[in-house]
């Protein structure tokens, strides 16, 4: 009894030494972390729907689960799926944390996503079931540009701003590809001030220029096929379909993408990129962030 008292006193004194130590102790006690049990404070995946099967539990965000044992994040609890890597293998979740958790289709918090409010116990939707690749606690409200442009999973940036590696010149926009024929959505509202319809092939560059007077910026889309109803003078809203992905002004169909370029002021044409070593546009990252987009 005397020994136990002494140990307890020592432990209490140790905890009182620093707030950090006390906080660590509390956190460990309430959420054991990666033990296959869905504790209070954790976000948990289940191998099967309706919170059945093996559990994989988390206390924080993970951008890349890995795909092979022994290094991947796996299902740890007893039951179906135990020991399997969790990437593209989860069917339901229980969010026992106090924050919203966002499950993403792609690694790096990209692609389609599904949000789970604190306390939510639910199945992944048909898009996300067995397609989970990362999750983010307390996600930003920003949408990825590649998702905003195509509004479907799978779009990705193929060349960033000033990102030419083999092409001569300075890249004045951001290239985003998904697949020929994919709907292209306006990222920013504004007035259509110029359209060139073009044609597939290297000499048929197409252009859609959308000027937003309150922002004092023009967003220009190249290479896609403008929708037939789109006309100069028309107001387009954020998210409105304005074109279909194509290869107008690109030599090969395999290079199809949409070039999205932000220009200061009112501009009908994109700045010259290929074979032009003067960068005319500023880095657009802060602009896209201000419009609610991540540049990814
Ligand atoms: Zn481009």
Image (spheres, rainbow, N blue to C red):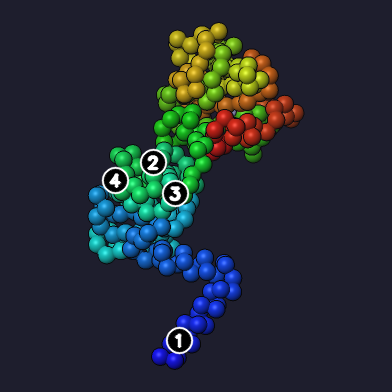
Percent coordinates x, y for residue 70 in the rendering: 41, 65
Q: Are marks 1 and 2 in contact (CB under 8 Å)?
A: no
| SS at mark 2 in the image | strand
Q: Residue at x 27, y 53 (%)?
A: 51
**Please, which residue is most extreme toward the bottom here?**
2
* Alpha carbons under labels 1 and 3: distance apart: 39 Å
Left or right: 270 as drawn, with respect to 150: right
Q: Is mark 2 within 8 Å of ligand 1?
A: no
Residue in the picture at 47% in, 42% down:
110
User: Is residue 68 among what the camera can see?
Assistant: no
Give the number of the mark in front: 4 or 1: 1
* Alpha-carbon span between mark 4 and mark 3: 18 Å
Circle 3 sits on which residue?
A: 99
**Farthest-out residue, right:** 278
Q: Which residue is mark 1?
A: 5
N-terminal label among 1 and 2: 1
| Nearer mark to the viewer, of 1 and 2 | 1
Q: CA distance from mark 4 to mark 1?
A: 48 Å
Is 19 displayed left or right of 129 in the figure? Answer: right
Q: Kindly identify which residue carries mark 4.
A: 123
Read off the residue under disc 2: 114
First in sequence, mark 1 or 3: give its number.
Answer: 1
N-terminal of the pair, mark 4 or mark 3, is 3
Pick whichever, 5 or 147, lies toward us: 5
Can you tell which of label 1 and label 3 is closer to the viewer?
1
Q: Name the residue located 30 percent from the left edge and 46 percent from the top edge.
A: 122
């Amino acid at each position: 009894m005397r020994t136990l008292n002494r140990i307890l006193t020592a432990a209490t004194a140790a905890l009182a030494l620093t707030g950090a130590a006390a906080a660590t102790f509390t956190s460990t006690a309430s959420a054991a972390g990666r033990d296959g049990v869905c504790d209070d404070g954790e976000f948990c995946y289940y191998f099967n729907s309706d919170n059945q099967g093996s559990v994989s539990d988390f206390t924080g965000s993970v951008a890349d689960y890995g795909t092979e044992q022994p290094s991947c994040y796996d299902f740890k609890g007893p039951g179906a799926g135990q020991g399997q890597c969790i990437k593209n293998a989860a069917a339901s979740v229980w969010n026992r944390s106090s924050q919203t958790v966002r499950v993403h289709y792609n690694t790096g918090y990209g692609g389609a996503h599904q949000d789970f409010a604190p306390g939510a116990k639910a199945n992944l939707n048909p898009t996300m079931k067995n397609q989970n690749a990362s999750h983010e606690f307390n996600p930003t409200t920003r949408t990825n540009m590649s998702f905003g442009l195509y509004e479907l999973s799978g779009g990705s940036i193929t060349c960033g701003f000033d990102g030419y590696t083999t092409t001569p010149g300075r890249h004045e926009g951001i290239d985003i590809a998904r697949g020929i024929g994919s709907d292209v959505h306006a990222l920013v509202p504004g007035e259509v001030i110029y359209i060139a319809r073009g044609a597939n092939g290297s000499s048929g560059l197409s252009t859609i220029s959308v000027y937003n007077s309150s922002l004092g910026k023009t967003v220009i889309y190249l290479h896609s096929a403008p929708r037939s109803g789109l006309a100069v003078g028309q107001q387009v809203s954020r998210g409105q379909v304005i074109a279909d992905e194509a290869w107008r002004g690109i030599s090969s169909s395999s290079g199809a993408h949409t070039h999205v370029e932000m220009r200061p002021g009112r501009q009908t044409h994109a700045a010259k990129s290929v074979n032009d070593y003067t960068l005319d546009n500023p880095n657009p990252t802060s602009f896209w962030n201000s419009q609610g987009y991540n540049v990814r």
